[in-house]
Amino acid sequence: MTDLKPNQATDKNLELMRNFAQSYAKRTGTYFCSDAGVTAVVLEGLAKHKDDLGAPLCPCRHYEDKGAEVKAIYWNCPCIPMQERKECHCMLFLTPDNPFAGDQQDITFETIRTETNKF
């Protein structure tokens, strides 16, 4: 296990979210942001919420009560707007016509840690 910063998730949940995101992107025909830093920070946030809350609550929103939001499931990744309309507020899953969409549906664990170690 690596030395984690306060904003970093456990290796286990980060790898779990990385695998989920890669699989989900391929299944839905979406792509990660062209800026790998955006993808890394979002995946780290999802994994950290999984560590702290038991569910991958969207890390890009403000919540008055994160526990209540987890139970409501609306913002648990993949959130309802993503499932219903392919709208990802976090810019993790982007449709090919989005100007910020890259051409990748994969990201390495090392890339995620390299990007999140910058903060």
Image (cartoon, rainbow, N blue to C red):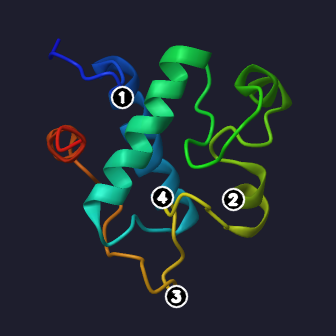
Whole-angstrom CA distance, mark 1 to mark 2, is 25 Å
Q: Is residue 78 left or right of residue 29?
A: right
Q: Percent x, y for residue 63?
A: 72, 37
In three-dimensional space, the C-alpha distance between marks 3 and 1, rounded to whole angstroms, equals 31 Å
Could you tell me which residue is drawn at 48 percent across and 17 percent down? 51
Position in image of residue 28 (x %, y %): 57, 63
Cα distance in 3D space between marks 3 and 2: 15 Å
**Is the N terminus in the top left, top right, bottom left or bottom right quadrant?**
top left
User: Quick one: SS at disc 1?
Assistant: loop
- Residue 57: give its label: none
Question: In the rendered structure, which disc, 1 or 2, sits on the residue that comes first in sequence?
Answer: 1
Q: Is residue 88 above or below residue 75?
A: below
Residue 7, labelled with which disc? 1
Count of numbered circles on the image: 4
Q: Distance between the Cα atoms at labels 1 and 4? A: 18 Å
Looking at the image, which residue is at 45% across and 47% down?
Answer: 21
Residue under label 4 = 92
Q: Quadrant of residue 100?
A: bottom left
Q: CA distance from mark 4 to mark 3?
A: 14 Å
> Is label 4 in a helix, a strand or a loop?
loop
Q: Residues within 10 Å of mark 1 (few under 14, many from 20)?
A: few
Taking the image as shown, residue 101 lies to the left or right of residue 53, namely left
Q: Are marks 3 and 1 in contact (CB under 8 Å)?
A: no
Q: Are marks 1 and 2 in contact (CB under 8 Å)?
A: no
Q: Earlier in the sequence, mark 1 or mark 4?
A: 1
Image x and y of residue 109, in percent: 22, 38
Q: Is residue 105 left or right of residue 70?
A: left
Q: Which residue is mark 3?
A: 97
Mark 3 surroundings within 10 Å by alpha-carbon count, few (fewer than 14), some (14 through 19), many (20 or more): few
- Please tell me which of labels 3 and 1 falls first in the chain: 1
69 relative to 119 in the view: left or right: right
The relative height of residue 102 versus residue 3 in the rendered view (above or below) is below
